Image (cartoon, helix red, strand yellow):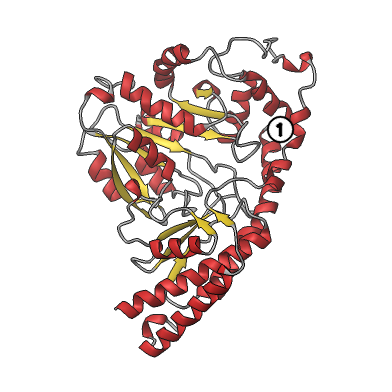
C-alpha cells in the first residue's frame, strides 16, 4: 500500500516498527561504510599480476628503445597512448598520458585555464571576473569541490534519463560569456548511472558558446565499466565535434583507476591538436615527465584494448552480485510504498536513491547513528545543497556482500522511519 494513503494510526504503527528495528540494529554495534566508490580487495587482486611484469632492466625499454627509468617523453609513451587510443577511440596524437589520477588532471586543467587561459581565449579565466561552470546534478562531488576551491560559481543543471537538461545548458552556454565550462560524466554518470543519449552528445558537440574559451570537461571515468554482458554505447564526442567545427571545446579525461589500481593507475587527458599545442609548453614547466615505468607496466600487462575488456568482465563478475543485492533489497523493502525510488544502473559504481522530499538528511543521520556511513546528503549537488533534500548515493563496491546486504537493510529501515515521520507531520 502506498504510504501516503495510510491512516494516521497506520503511519504511527509503521513509524514505531521502524524505530524498534533501528534500535535492534544499534544494539549490534555495526560499522558499515557505503560512502565511496572504492574497488574492493577482491577487485584489486585481479590486477596483482601487474606487479610482476617488470622484473629487470630489459623490461623498462619502450619499442623505440627509450629507457623508461630516465627523464623524457612529457606526454607519455607511444605504446600507452595507443592502448588508450584503441580503448577509447581517440587519436593517439590527441592524448597526454600523465600520472595515476584523472581528478588531478582535471584540477590542474582548471587551474591552468585560470592562470594561462585556453586556446582561442582572450585572457586567463582568473582575470575575467565572475566565472561560472554548469554542474549536472545529481553529480560528482569532487567536480564541485574543484570549482568551490577556485571560487568558480556553480550552476546546477537537472539530470534527465538522457543526460543533462540540454534546454537549460543551451540557455546558459549560448547567452552568458561568463559560463566557461560544464562537467560531464557521460557514461554511467555519478551517481545516477545515466549514459548520455546520442542526441545529447550531438547537442553538446554542436554548442555555440557565448564564451570563445568555453570547454566541456568530459570525464569518461566509467568508459568500460559495464556490470552486465551488454555493452552500453556512448557516442563519440570528438567525431561529432569535428563535424560541427567545435573540437577545440572538448577536454576529455579517463584513467585506469578502477581498472587496475586506483593509487597506481594511469590517467590521460585528450584534446584537439590546437589545445595540445597550447597545453604542452605549460605542462613542461610543471614536470619533465610522468611515471613511464608504470605506463609500461600497464601496456605489458593488458597488451591491448581486448585485454582490458576481458579484465573488466572479471571486475563485473565481482561487482554484479553486490549491485543486484542492493537492488533486490530496495525492491523488497521499499517497492510499491511510494516513499523512495532508485536507479538500476547497467554499469559504473553507484546507485542513486531518492527519498521523499526533505528526508535525505534525516536518513543520513539515522543511518550514522546506528553505524552505517553514507555519503552525506546533499553531496551530489553544488555547495552541498540538494534543493529537495532527497538524493543519497549508494556505493556497493567496497564492502563484502554480507556487509552490503546488512547496510542496505539498515538504510531501508531509516528511509521508512524518516518517511513515516514526514507523512505524520503533514
- 8 left or right of 393? left
* Quadrant of the snapshot with the N terminus: bottom left
Residue 318, visible in the rendered structure: yes
Q: Nearer the viewer, residue 195 or 30?
A: 30
**Residue 184 falls in which quadrant of the image?**
top left
Q: Residue at x 54, y 43 (%)?
A: 222
Disc 1, SS:
helix
Q: What is the crowding at mark 1: few (fewer than 14 residues within 10 Å), some, or many (at least 20)?
A: some
Q: Tell how many labels.
A: 1
Q: Which residue is mark 1?
A: 302
Query: Height in image: 112 above or below 64?
Result: below
Q: Position of residue 189 (x, y in %)?
A: 47, 48
Q: Nearer the viewer, residue 293 or 379?
A: 379
Q: Nearer the viewer, residue 364 or 288?
A: 364
Residue 253, visible in the rendered structure: no
- 285 left or right of 295? left
Q: Position of residue 233 (x, y in %)?
A: 54, 47
Query: Height in image: 380 above or below 104?
Result: below
Q: Position of residue 179 (x, y in %)?
A: 26, 36
- 179 left or right of 19? left
Q: Residue at x 40, y 31 (%)?
A: 250
Query: Height in image: 366 above or below 118?
Result: below
- 407 left or right of 252? right
Q: Position of residue 90 (x, y in %)?
A: 53, 30
* Quadrant of the snapshot with the C terminus: bottom left
Q: Residue at x 60, y 9 (%)?
A: 71
Amino acid at each position: 500500500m502506498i504510504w501516503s494513503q495510510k491512516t494516521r494510526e497506520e503511519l504511527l504503527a509503521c513509524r514505531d516498527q521502524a524505530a524498534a528495528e533501528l534500535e535492534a540494529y544499534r544494539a549490534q554495534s555495526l560499522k558499515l561504510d557505503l560512502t565511496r566508490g572504492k574497488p574492493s580487495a577482491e577487485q584489486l587482486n585481479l590486477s596483482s599480476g601487474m606487479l610482476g611484469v617488470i622484473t629487470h632492466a630489459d623490461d623498462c625499454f619502450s619499442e623505440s628503445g627509450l629507457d623508461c627509468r630516465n627523464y623524457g617523453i612529457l606526454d607519455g609513451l607511444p605504446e600507452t597512448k595507443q592502448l588508450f587510443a584503441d580503448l577509447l577511440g581517440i587519436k593517439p596524437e590527441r592524448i597526454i598520458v600523465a600520472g595515476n589520477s584523472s581528478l588531478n588532471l582535471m584540477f590542474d586543467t582548471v587551474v591552468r585555464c585560470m592562470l594561462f587561459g585556453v586556446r582561442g581565449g582572450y585572457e586567463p579565466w582568473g582575470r575575467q571576473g565572475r566565472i561560472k561552470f554548469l554542474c549536472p546534478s545529481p553529480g560528482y562531488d569532487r567536480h564541485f569541490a574543484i570549482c568551490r576551491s577556485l571560487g568558480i560559481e556553480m550552476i546546477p543543471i537537472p539530470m534527465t534519463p538522457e543526460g543533462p537538461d540540454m534546454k537549460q545548458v543551451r540557455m546558459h552556454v549560448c547567452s552568458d560569456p561568463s559560463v566557461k565550462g560544464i562537467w560531464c560524466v557521460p557514461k554511467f554518470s555519478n551517481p545516477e548511472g545515466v549514459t548520455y543519449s546520442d542526441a545529447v552528445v550531438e547537442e553538446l558537440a554542436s554548442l555555440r558558446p557565448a564564451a570563445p574559451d568555453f570547454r566541456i570537461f568530459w570525464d569518461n571515468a566509467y568508459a568500460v565499466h559495464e556490470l552486465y554482458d551488454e555493452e552500453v554505447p556512448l557516442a563519440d564526442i570528438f567525431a561529432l565535434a569535428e563535424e560541427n567545427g567545435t573540437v577545440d571545446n572538448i577536454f576529455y579525461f579517463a584513467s585506469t583507476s578502477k581498472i587496475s589500481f586506483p593509487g597506481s593507475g594511469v590517467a590521460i587527458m585528450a584534446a584537439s591538436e590546437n589545445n595540445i599545442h597550447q597545453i604542452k609548453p605549460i605542462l613542461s614547466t610543471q614536470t619533465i615527465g610522468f611515471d613511464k615505468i608504470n605506463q609500461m607496466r600497464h601496456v605489458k600487462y593488458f597488451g591491448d584494448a581486448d585485454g582490458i575488456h576481458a579484465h573488466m568482465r572479471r571486475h563485473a563478475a565481482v561487482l554484479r552480485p553486490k549491485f543486484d543485492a542492493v537492488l533486490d533489497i530496495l525492491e523488497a523493502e521499499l517497492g510499491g510504498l511510494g516513499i523512495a525510488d532508485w536507479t538500476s544502473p547497467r554499469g559504473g559504481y553507484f546507485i542513486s536513491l531518492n527519498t521523499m522530499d526533505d528526508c535525505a538528511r534525516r536518513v543520513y543521520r539515522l543511518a550514522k547513528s546506528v553505524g552505517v556511513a553514507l555519503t552525506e546528503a546533499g553531496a551530489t549537488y553544488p555547495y552541498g545543497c540538494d534543493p529537495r533534500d532527497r538524493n543519497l548515493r549508494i556505493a556497493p563496491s567496497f564492502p563484502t556482500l554480507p556487509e552490503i546486504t546488512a547496510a542496505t537493510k539498515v538504510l531501508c529501515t531509516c528511509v521508512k522511519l524518516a518517511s513515516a515521520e514526514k507523512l505524520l507531520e503533514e
